[in-house]
Amino acid sequence: MPLESPDKEFFNAAVGYTQLGMFLEANEQLENIDPFNRVTPEVLALRVDIYRGLQKWDLMREIAGRLCEFDQTNVQWPISYAYTTRRGESLNAARNILINAVP
């Protein structure tokens, strides 16, 4: 279900802030989105980018893991999940994520 006004405007503003490297401002825009819509895949995907920029590895890992479960066909999610696992845990744990994602 695509986002509708005003959530779409908040999302678009967050995308713009993210592109400018203004991750705190981007996160603030996402907080304005209706709580029900904050769990949509496009909002969660943007949160991954924001948390990467803020170096919040635990939060990024949680969201990337959720996206891996939700959309198993998108190769970006296991890569993001492994990346943040490497940053927050270990290289071996990240390697295991990628090995298990190969099929």
Image: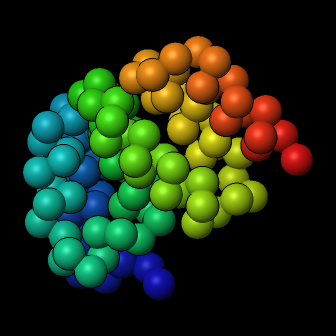
Q: Is 47 above or below relative to 56?
A: below
Q: Residue at x 11, y 51 (%)?
A: 28
Residue projecting furthest to the right: 103
Q: Is 91 above or below relative to 72?
A: above
Whether residue 11 is visible:
yes
Direction from residue 55 to residue 42 in the image, left or right: right
Q: Nearer the viewer, residue 17 or 95?
A: 95
Q: Nearer the viewer, residue 16 or 1?
A: 1
Q: Position of residue 100 (x, y in %)?
A: 77, 40
Q: Residue at x 63, y 18 (%)?
A: 92
Residue projecting furthest to the top: 91
Image colouring: rainbow
Q: Residue at x 40, y 23 (%)?
A: 88
Q: Position of residue 54 (x, y in %)?
A: 25, 28
Direction from residue 81 to residue 78 in the image, left or right: right
Q: Quadrant of residue 69?
A: bottom right
Q: Residue at x 14, y 37 (%)?
A: 24
Q: Position of residue 47 (x, y in %)?
A: 34, 48
Number of numbered callouts drawn: 0
Q: Is 63 above or below relative to 38?
A: above
Q: Position of residue 31 (x, y in %)?
A: 14, 60
Whether residue 20 is visible:
no
Q: Is 76 above or below relative to 33?
A: above
Direction from residue 70 to residue 17 in the image, left or right: left
